Image (tube, rainbow, N blue to C red):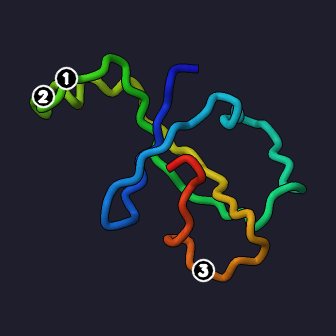
Amino acid sequence: MPRCWKVGLNTPEPMLGIIYGDSVLPDGAVLDLRDAGTPRIEGEILLRIGQVPYPECENATLLASIALIQVAMEIADCRITNWAAPIDHWVADNA
């Protein structure tokens, strides 16, 4: 799997984290949540970049670099069981 990054835009400043290949499940896979603390599902938009655009490129170049756009889901989890904080307070371990 190519290197993938998650960009979170739900806080005042963007958060960036690595998506590790072993954390991505193929279509139709079953996720075992028995070891999860307080899992929540988030809808995501996945953008796969074909050729990395250069910094400060024009919009057309940036758009042309997108190889795939699809719907994705993330299972956000917290190690604190039944944590009552709102979902926008959760931050991924690697972000």
Label 2 or label 3, whichever lies nearer to me, is 3
The secondary element bearing badge 3 is classed as: loop
Residue where numbered disc 1 is placed: 54
Side (left or right) of 27 relative to 36: left
The secondary element bearing badge 1 is classed as: loop
Q: Residue furthest top?
A: 51
The secondary element bearing badge 2 is classed as: loop
Q: Is residue 14 above or below residue 4?
A: below
Q: Position of residue 16 (x, y in %)?
A: 42, 46
Q: Is residue 58 above or below residue 93?
A: above
* Badge 2 vs badge 1, beta-carbon distance below 8 Å: yes
Which residue is at 79% across, 72% downward? 81
Q: Position of residue 29 (x, y in %)?
A: 78, 37
Q: Nearer the viewer, residue 94 or 32?
A: 94
Side (left or right) of 61 relative to 25: left
Q: Amino acid at mark 3?
A: Ala
Quarter of the view holding residue 42: bottom right
Quarter of the view holding residue 9: bottom left
Q: Is residue 45 above or below residue 68?
A: below
- State how far apart marks 2 and 3 are (Cα): 39 Å
Residue 85's mark?
A: 3
Residue 38's mark?
A: none
Q: Residues within 10 Å of mark 2 (few under 14, many from 20)?
A: few
- State how far apart marks 2 and 1 are (Cα): 6 Å
Q: Quadrant of the N terminus?
A: top right
Q: How many marks?
A: 3
Quarter of the view holding residue 48: top left
Q: Amino acid at mark 1?
A: Tyr
Residue where numbered disc 2 is placed: 57
Q: Position of residue 66 (x, y in %)?
A: 33, 27
Instruction: Of the two numbered discs 1 and 3 on the same chain, state the one appearing first in sequence.
Output: 1
* Badge 1 vs badge 3, beta-carbon distance below 8 Å: no
